[in-house]
Image (cartoon, rainbow, N blue to C red):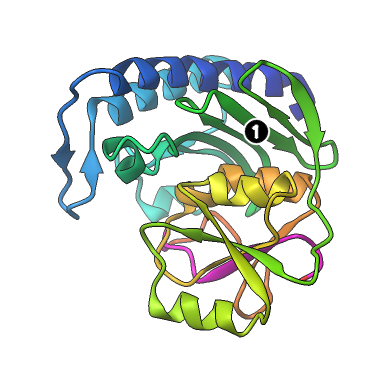
């Protein structure tokens, strides 16, 4: 499959889901909670349905793993060499708190590596996408599209951190970097800040799942960055345990 030929279609699917999400965001929506006490709204469900339907029309033979989909047993997933990985809304807390920093995420995983990713920020009216070997791009709120790439860091490292997950372990890691400044961002936009050269490093020493990171990871890789575990190994996907290990996302300097 020539992935460059389907990327515009994937972006169109993400835009359609984003439009529906934004329409719900502008209403007095209700927040429910899943068994793990994480929030879920009608926007999560609507985005999931639009993306799954669109991807199935686009590629009948590629399986789909979604945060809001049915649980798929490892006995089936272990045979997947290629699959769609989606997070209908990453940053649901940002959605419910109306910060605007939530995203719609679609990734294509092949042999454990995110090779295509689309990230849209409906409330910010921005979109990012990347494809292995073909670079990364951003579309701003005016509709202008530009190629993006990671930046060479200055003396003070620009560290992007989560507003909701800045724990003591992360603070200790950041302090070891020496001179630095904090760049605040929500959801998968933290990866995108590095991809477009507005930040240098994002340490995540807390729990995330594969769907939280796949799409933005693909964008960052295409922009010249990397995401590694604390052991220096590339962050991989399609594992039996869908939880990610702790990781560090950065430009290629770290």
Residue 113 in sight from this viewpoint: yes
Can you say whether 88 is above or below 60 in the image? below
Can you say whether 241 is above or below 72 in the image? below
Give the camera-side residue of 153 and 22: 153
Q: Would residue 247 be counted in the magenta stretch?
A: yes
Q: Would residue 178 be counted in the magenta stretch?
A: no
Residue hosting label 1: 128
* Residue 131 image-quadrant placement: top right
Quadrant of the image containing the N terminus: top right
User: At 78% across and 42% down in the image, what residue appears?
Assistant: 132
Residue 194: x percent and y percent?
68, 52
Give the camera-side residue of 53 and 100: 100
Q: How many marks?
A: 1
Residue 77: x percent and y percent?
46, 49
Magenta-colored segment: predominant secondary structure: loop
Decide: few, some or many residues near mark 1? Use Cα within 10 Å; few <14, some 14-19, many ≥20.
many
Residue 110 in sight from this viewpoint: no
Residue 210 falls left or right of residue 139: left
Can you say whether 170 is above or below 163 in the image? below
User: At 67% across and 55% down in the image, what residue appears?
Assistant: 199
Can you say whether 12 is above or below 100 in the image? above
User: At 42% across and 59% down in the image, what residue appears?
Assistant: 208
User: What span is in magenta?
Assistant: 241-253
Residue 49: x percent and y percent?
36, 21
């Amino acid at each position: 499959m020539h992935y460059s030929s389907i990327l515009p279609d994937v972006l169109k699917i993400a835009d359609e889901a984003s439009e529906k999400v934004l329409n719900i965001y502008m209403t007095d929506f209700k927040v429910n909670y899943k068994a793990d006490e994480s929030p879920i709204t009608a926007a999560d469900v609507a985005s999931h349905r639009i993306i799954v339907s669109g991807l199935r029309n686009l590629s009948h033979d590629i399986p789909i793993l979604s945060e809001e989909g049915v649980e798929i047993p490892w006995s089936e997933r272990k045979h997947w060499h290629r699959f769609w990985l989606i997070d209908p809304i990453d940053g649901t807390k940002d959605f419910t708190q109306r910060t605007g920093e939530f995203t719609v995420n679609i990734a294509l995983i092949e042999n454990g590596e995110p090779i295509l990713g689309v990230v849209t920020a409906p409330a910010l009216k921005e979109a990012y996408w990347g494809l292995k070997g073909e670079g990364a791009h951003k579309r701003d709120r005016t509709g202008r599209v530009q190629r993006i790439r990671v930046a060479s860091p200055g003396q003070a490292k620009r560290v992007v951190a989560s507003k909701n997950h800045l724990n003591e372990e992360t603070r200790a890691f950041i302090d070891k970097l020496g001179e630095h400044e904090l760049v605040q961002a929500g959801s998968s936009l933290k990866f995108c800040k590095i991809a477009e050269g507005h930040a240098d490093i994002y340490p995540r020493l807390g729990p995330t799942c594969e769907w939280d990171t796949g799409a933005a990871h693909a964008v960052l890789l295409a922009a010249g960055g990397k995401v590694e575990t604390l052991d220096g190994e590339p962050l991989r996907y399609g594992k039996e345990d869908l939880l990610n290990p702790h990781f560090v996302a950065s430009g290629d300097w770290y």
